[in-house]
Amino acid sequence: MRTVTIECHIGKSSDTFETPSGFLGDVSFLRDHFFAGSDGVINLVPRNRIPEGPIVGAQAQVVDALDLHFAVERLAANPPGATRVSRVALILANSYRPRKSVFGVMFDRGQPTKDDPNDALEFTATPREGCAIFVDAIQRLRHDPIEFDKEVEFTTVHELGHLFNLDHLESPPSFMATSLVTRSHNFDHFQFTHGQHGWLAECATNRWVYPGGSPFVPVSAENTPCRRPVVHSEAPKVDLRIGIENAVFACAAPVEMDVTLSSAADSAHVLRIPDRLDPGYEEFIVWITYPNGNRCRYRSPRRYCSPQVKLTLKPGQSIARDISIFAGAGGTTFATPGIYHLRAEFDLGTRGRVVSNEIVVEAVANRRLLTPERMALLLDPSVRSLLYHRRDKGGRNILPLLRHHLQADPQGVGANDIRYALVRTLYGRGMRATEAQAVRDDIELIWSIPGTLGRRQLHHLQTMHQKSIRDSKRPEP
């Protein structure tokens, strides 16, 4: 098995904090953990350059992503545009300006994000070159020197793990678990799992593992070896795109995500793919990074076990879906106000997997966007069930309640989402002539307020509008 030597150049952002004791010597714990965790494949050689002086500014109290990018250039000095690197950077700093409570960050992701909007090619062309840990942020929660040293070691290995595209994993215990608030992890977490061993052991051959080889896209929830690597726009040329029409919404709002899987017009392949572009199937995964930094898989309240049907995707064609994601198996998805990052992943079968773009949305406290009456309505469990499933499953007849609410409060945030659920529910169960006219009126009212629904929802409305015209002319039985 081939050994890969990677130098880890370690620098300090400023002189305003004491260097943790683990970085006063040769920092051998880095080599030991990654050599053991990769079954002898990764030889991570520490290059302690802290004695050379600060790399951001002698009195710098906080750093942002741009500071860190420049620090990586100075420490690692990899060739511009390299697609595989033999030097990575680890930066010790006080705290991170975008999120001052985080212990560490792998900021070098290969694409701009909310906390790192720097999209210049010099910062995105070679991803996964560097990470940082924040000493002051750790010190604020780890007052005991022993607990502090444990957290520094754990966070350092955790962030370096992200450089190899390792994902967060809460169980079984490992370095890739998220840090606790009240204490450092026990020593049973100071290891890599069997699956992570297998993943790191592919560093010599898998570009989704070795630094610089791909954007930051953790490709496996359990970090098991990935023999079918993710594809972006390579042969076959497949693109997965996600989007949410309104990027700022109330926590209780019914949020719909548009999903489009397309094949490039110049692709030479006709694809047969699973008809499972929905998080109710194992093949389709939505990853959500929460405001506290935790990254988890969205768990749909619907689980499908139907026989696998194949769809044909010809060059230049696309498949589109709209997916309700505001409620999950564990409750409300966007329950906490703050910034959320979403990315999707779809298993194409024998042709590998494709990863989507990342979108950033903000959930706002309900009272800031919703009237008290609408907030109470949208928080009603039976109403939320109808908004999600688009049919009345709760034993109460919710439709008259929604209709009465809209008559009293026809405008404002959430009104068109309620109308859309009404239309889909009536359409799904079959409409009488009077209901068809009401559906038609609702659709035309939605169209009069543009920018509130997603593209796929508008497509459904066009189809339902045409049917409502036909049904409204049908004589009552």
Image (tube, grey):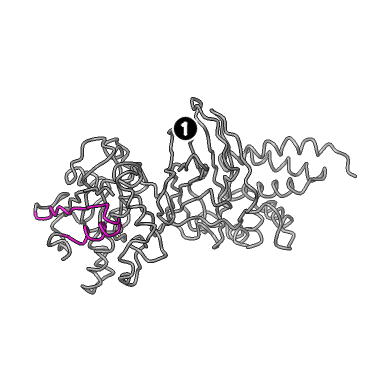
Which image quadrant: the C terminus?
top right
Residue 375: quarter of image: bottom right
Give, as a three-letter code, the residue at label 1: Lys
Q: Position of residue 158 (x, y in %)?
A: 30, 58
In-front residue for pair 58/38 = 38
Which residue was labeled with disc 1?
237
Quadrant assignment, res 327: bottom right
Q: Position of residue 129 (x, y in %)?
A: 26, 46
- Helix, strand or loop at label 1? It is loop
> Could you tell me which residue is drawn at 20 percent across and 40 percent down?
78
**In this rendering, position of residue 190 left or right of residue 364:** left
For the point 62% across and 46% down, which residue is it?
Answer: 308
Q: Residue furthest top?
A: 266
- Picture coordinates of residue 286 (x, y %)? 49, 50
Residue ranking furthest to the left: 52
Question: Is residue 48 rendered magenta in the image?
Answer: yes
> Does residue 401 sit above or below 1 in this rendering?
below
Does 302 appear above or below 88? below
Inspect the magenta stretch and tell me whether residue 44 lies in it: yes
Q: Is residue 13 visible?
A: no
Q: Residues within 10 Å of mark 1 (few under 14, many from 20)?
A: some
Residue interval drawn in magenta: 27-51
Which residue is painted at 70% across and 43% down in the image?
442
Closest to the observer, 317 or 41: 41
Can see residue 347?
Answer: yes
Relative side of 85 to 435, left or right: left
Report whether 159 appears left or right of 325. left
Q: Position of residue 418 (x, y in %)?
A: 64, 50
